[in-house]
Image (cartoon, rainbow, N blue to C red):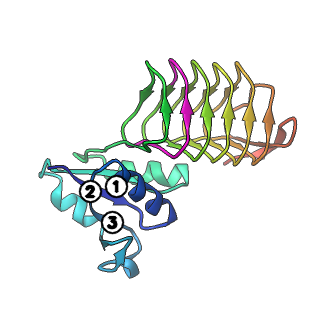
Amino acid sequence: MTKRIIYGASGHGKVLADIVEQNGQSIYCFVDDDKTKWEEIFFGHEIHSPDFLFDNIPNNEFECIIAVGNCKTRERIVQKLINGVKYFKAIHPSAQIAKNVHIGEGTVVMANVVINSDSSIGNHCIINTSSSIDHDCFIQNFVHISPGVHLGGRVQIGDLTWIGLGASIVNNINIGENTIVGAGAVVIHDVDQHVVVAGNPAKYLRKNL
């Protein structure tokens, strides 16, 4: 029987745990970098040091998912754990996933999400509550789509990009890697990589270093 480990004893971790349990699956434990949390009980499960994962890598019963909202932090954790750790994806039972949709390892799809035909979601992404992704979108790795975001058809989003709460992106837009789109933004033109944009219509604010 697969034993699922959630990396991150936080609010996001609670949401992930709920998704796992609503799918009739079990959680073995949490792990967290904060040593003050170790051996505490969180959401009904023990919290351990990340060393617990390394100690159990040879045991094929264990799979992990990263419950950290920040895209760059999520990437750093995966790089740290890279040798031998297996990842699972978590999809809320209320999500509407069309045919021919690809969802990568370590990705979470939360409640009331809609993903339409022929879209592709990369590895270790967060598709947050009540967001919608229309047909033929291409989302790369370590992306965070915040609650209430709407993507039109054929939108492309680069690695490590964060789309803020309630943002809307019209059809056929390309957004570069390591970019932040502010909450409530309306994106009607392509967005470069490594920048922060916000507003309606979305405009350049600064570099995202």
Residue 106 percent across, percent down from the top left: 38, 43
111 in the magenta segment = yes
Drawn side of residue 206 relative to residue 120, left or right? right
Crowd class of label 2 (few under 14; some 14 to 19; many from 20; radius 10 Å): some
Drawn side of residue 204 relative to residue 36, left or right? right
Q: Amino acid at mark 3?
A: Val
Question: Which residue has dot 1 on it?
Answer: 21
Q: Nearer the viewer, mark 1 or mark 3?
A: 1
Residue in the image at 75% along x and 25% along y: 170
Drawn side of residue 165 relative to residue 112, left or right? right
Question: Which residue has dot 3 on it?
Answer: 31
Which range is magenta? Answer: 106-119
Give the mark nearer the N terminus: 1 vs 2: 1
Q: Secondary structure at mark 2?
A: loop
126 in the magenta segment = no
Q: Cβ–Cβ below 8 Å for labels 3 and 2?
A: no
